[in-house]
Image (cartoon, coloured by chain):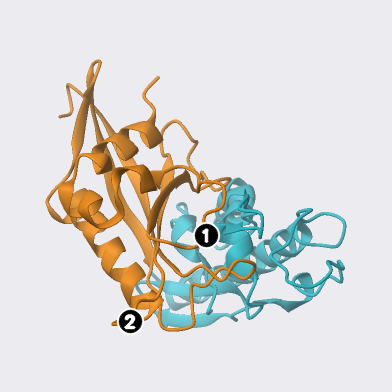
Amino acid sequence: MSSDVVTRVNGASVSLVENVGHRLLSETRSRVAPGVGPGPHPHVTQHVDTGWLRDHIFLTGVVHESRRHGVVNGVVTDVEYAKYLEIGWHSSKGNFFKYPFMLPAVSAIRQWAIQEAARLFRLAGKRRAPNVGGLLSIDSPK
Amino acid sequence: MFDVLEALTAYLKTQSSVTDDVGVANIAGRVPVGYNGAKFVLIIMDGGMFGEGPLQKPRVQIRCYAPATNSAPAARNARLLWAKVHDVLHRVGPVQVAITGGSVTLAKSWCSMLPQEGSNVEPETGWTFCMGVYTQVWTDRLSA
């Protein structure tokens, strides 16, 4: 491959990860926006929907890892109760609730991401786009 | 239709290493009324996150609860209980159940969440747990 094509393909990779990252961020945040999220929350005080979780979901940033693995991006949050929304929790009465919002956001944008990959790599002069599934990652540090 | 939760529950109830620890009644899909954080194995669908479609890729969460004892904190007890469950599901090799036209591998480990002291404590109840998420592999007779 000529250096020009390599540059264009690398540019497409970065664009793809940025586009997918921002779409994923937006999708994830929209699922926990005030009025959209779950009724019950894992809370010990009176529930007030402030949008705190939505405002504390961030992109990890674009990272160039290696030529083989390309670039990665992810969505993180440092809100402690986000983990329990995702995996479920028991209320004080013993009822089990859950509101997974991160992995469903990945599922929701998967098809779009595949099309976006195809579009960007076509523009860059490459016939085949990379495996988009490998470009999506989600993490909760807590 | 094959019920993954029912099959997993039934299988775990036959495993003496697990039942000797928690009792047969404490392996279920729902905690009993008045439950207070005693040893319990909860088996539930890991809801709403079926990327490839629920029929092809069901995902099951197995959550092991345990209280603190005089000799060990709750996190350690929960982890030991989960290790017993994980062993009989996964480490001994695939647990397969025959179904019409093929078989189902009941538990393929997808991820686990092991507690450190102070983590994996449910916020409203204070129950400490250790959990693993497992997928199932459906195989037809031709590809088996």
Residue A120 is at least partly visible in this image: no
Q: Nearer the viewer, residue B91 or A96?
A: A96
Q: Say which quadrant the C terminus of chain B sits in.
A: top left
Q: Say which quadrant the N terminus of chain B sits in.
A: top left
Q: Nearer the viewer, residue B120 or B103?
A: B120
Q: Nearer the viewer, residue A90 or A38?
A: A90
Report the chain holding disc 2. B
Task: Report the residue that reaches farthest toward the top.
Answer: B100
Residue name at image x 41 percent, y 33 percent: B56
Label 2 neighbourhood size at 10 Å, few (<14), some (14-19), many (20+)? few
- Disc number placed over residue B17 in the picture, else none: none
The mark total stands at 2
Instruction: Indicate whether B89 appears above or below A53.
Output: above
- Disc number placed over residue A125 in the picture, else none: 1
Instruction: Give the residue type at disc 2.
Output: Asn
Residue matched to label 2: B70
Labels 1, 2: front one: 2
Q: Secondary structure at mark 2?
A: loop
Instruction: Give the residue type at disc 1.
Output: Gly
Report the chain holding disc 1. A
Residue name at image x 74 percent, y 57 percent: A31
Q: For this view, does A19 lie left or right of residue B66?
A: right
Instruction: Indicate whether B128 appears above or below A102.
Output: below
Q: Position of residue B91 (x, y in %)?
A: 16, 56
Task: Report the residue that reaches farthest toward the left.
Answer: B92
Q: Position of residue A37 (x, y in %)?
A: 78, 56
Q: For this view, does B5 lie left or right of residue A85?
A: left
Q: CA distance from mark 1 to mark 2?
A: 67 Å
Q: Which chain, by letter, is cyan?
A: A
